[in-house]
Amino acid sequence: MCFLVCAYRQHPRYRLVLVTNRDEFYQRPTAPAAFWDDEPGLLAGRDLQGGGTWMGVTRAGRFAALTNYREPGAHRPDAPTRGALVTGCLAGEDDPRAFLERLQATAGRYNGFNLLAGDADGLSYFSNRASGVRTLAPGLYGLSNHLLDTPWPKLVRGKAALAALLEAGEVDPEALFRLLADDREAPDDALPDTGVGLKWERALSSIFIKSPVYGTRASTLLLIDEAGRVTFIERSYAPQADGAPPRTLRFDFAVAPTTTAAK
């Protein structure tokens, strides 16, 4: 996943409003969002190549989301899949912060990543390209392919758009999807230099990415209200050349007590 903005305890009704775009090569096989047969309490899409996921939520209200850290010269093809980190956090027994604390010991095995994880008790962040686990205070946060809140143009624009929507009052899923569909590229003088060349820096600078071989595969909304009701909506996209319309899946459920719900 390459773009995420979230509002944590910034709305009178919702304690979490999290919106994400998963950007990936079109040829990488993926299953749409569902409760998994092998982890019945876990709701997420699934990377059928690596076996993990980029973001998800459980019936107990635990959630996690991952973005890759872009550093093409340091990528190790033999490193374990980073999607397993999200699965491990959601399916494990540790609370999210404890999972991130424990992960620090083995994080060097993975290519660069950011992992945001939380539950009803808090929100935490860890990157294996930064030091330590951070407990996040209520606020508005953004992640792309660098560290938390790195002010890349699309993150600045996305956070501002989310703040404006929250200020307007009612959280409208279609308005959130319009935020995620923003395909404007940043001007060249605002682009970061991450080592992928100017052509790709331009293409990757938009919130919604389009290219012949790589782009936004899915947009996902995760809303958790103060009463513990979860709304999870995934809108997936075929490559532009396919001409297929987007597919939208919606799941609504109430958070179950951890003593009776599978994580």
Image (tube, rainbow, N blue to C red):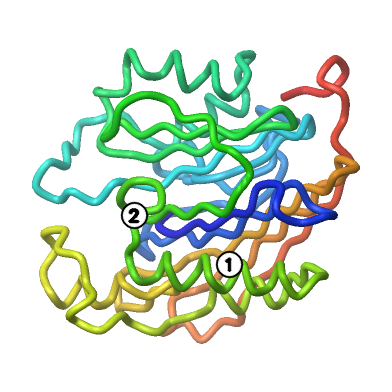
Which amino acid type corresponds to the residue marked 1 in the rendered image? Ser
Q: Nearer the viewer, residue 111 or 207?
A: 207
The image shows residue 59 at horizontal and vertical percentages of 79, 34
Callout 2, which amino acid? Answer: Thr
Say which residue label 2 marks.
150
Image side of residue 80 versus residue 124, left or right: left
How many numbered marks have been drawn onto this rendered protein structure? 2
Relative image position of residue 54 (x, y in whole percent): 49, 45
Say few, some or many: other residues with alpha carbon within 10 Å of mark 1 (under 14 / 14 to 19 / 20 or more). Answer: some
Q: Is residue 262 left or right of residue 49?
A: right
Q: Residue at x 55, y 36 (%)?
A: 136
Indicate the quadrant where residue 260 lies: top right
User: Within 10 angstroms of label 2, few (less than 14), some, or many (20 or more) residues?
Assistant: some
Say left or right for 127 vs 235. left
Q: How far across and down, in percent of the image, does residue 139 sit?
A: 60, 49
Vertical comparison of 126 with 187: above or below: above
Above/below status of 67 relative to 107: below
* Direction from residue 181 to residue 254 in the image, left or right: right
Q: Is residue 143 above or below residue 105?
A: below
Please name which of the two marks, 2 or 1, marks the residue nearer to the observer: 2
Residue beneath disc 1: 236
SS state under label 2: loop
Name the residue at 53% across, 58% down.
5
Quadrant containing the C terminus is: top right
At x 30%, y 78%, the residue is 212
What is the C-alpha distance between the residues marked 2 and 1? Answer: 27 Å
- Secondary structure of the residue carrying numbered label 1: strand
Q: Residue at x 16, y 42 (%)?
A: 75
Q: What label sits on residue 217 in the rendered view?
A: none
- Earlier-in-chain disc, 2 versus 1: 2
Whether tag 2 and tag 1 are in contact, CB under 8 A, the answer is no
